[in-house]
Amino acid sequence: MTRSVLSVSLKGLAKDGELGAQLFRIPLGDGMGVRDIALEGDHFLILAGPAADVTGKYSIYTWDGVMEDGIAPVVSLTDIPGAGDNRKAEALFPISHDEHVRRLLVLFDGEKEGSPLLLGISEEIASTLSNATI
């Protein structure tokens, strides 16, 4: 299943000018929706999770922001201790990214599970996942 991302010009929004709106259809899988999008360098990170307000599988993807198929998986939060299926990831903040490790802060919803989680994802793991299919 695909989800849509609408891109508009920030300058156009701020100055009541031309928006240059462009719609992208991002393939995230059945029942998955965009929970958050964050800029990291020259690409975006997409936090994806259940489209409905339920617990389930949450994943992080990179997207080039240009092509609908320019998306690649980074990590499934289901595979990370402390970020499993019973927490609802809602926000994503890139902290740093070098040639060895990508550090991300993920915020979760819920009274008991609502604490932040700092992730360190090695480039070895990320390159293995980039070769996987969504």
Image (tube, grey):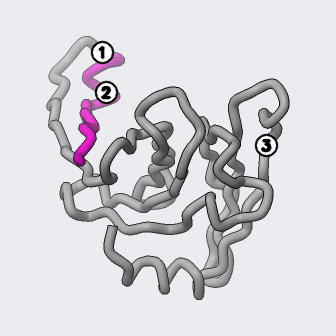
The image quadrant of residue 54 is top right
Residue depicted at 22% across the width and 55% down the height: 66
Instruction: Give the numbered dot on residue 116.
Output: 3
Give percent across and percent down for residue 124.
Answer: 59, 87
Q: Read off the magenta span.
A: 1-14
Between 109 and 39, the residue placed more toward the observer is 109
Front residue of this view, candidates 91 and 80:
80
* Spatial separation of the CA atoms under disc 1 and disc 3: 35 Å
Q: Which residue position is annotated with label 1? A: 15
Q: Amino acid at mark 2?
A: Lys
Q: CA distance from mark 2 to mark 1?
A: 6 Å
SS at badge 3:
loop
Element assignment for label 1: loop
Q: Label 3 vs label 2: CA separation?
A: 32 Å
Q: Are marks 3 and 2 in contact (CB under 8 Å)?
A: no
Amino acid tagged 3:
Pro
The residue pinned by badge 2 equals 11
Quadrant position of the C terminus in the picture: bottom left
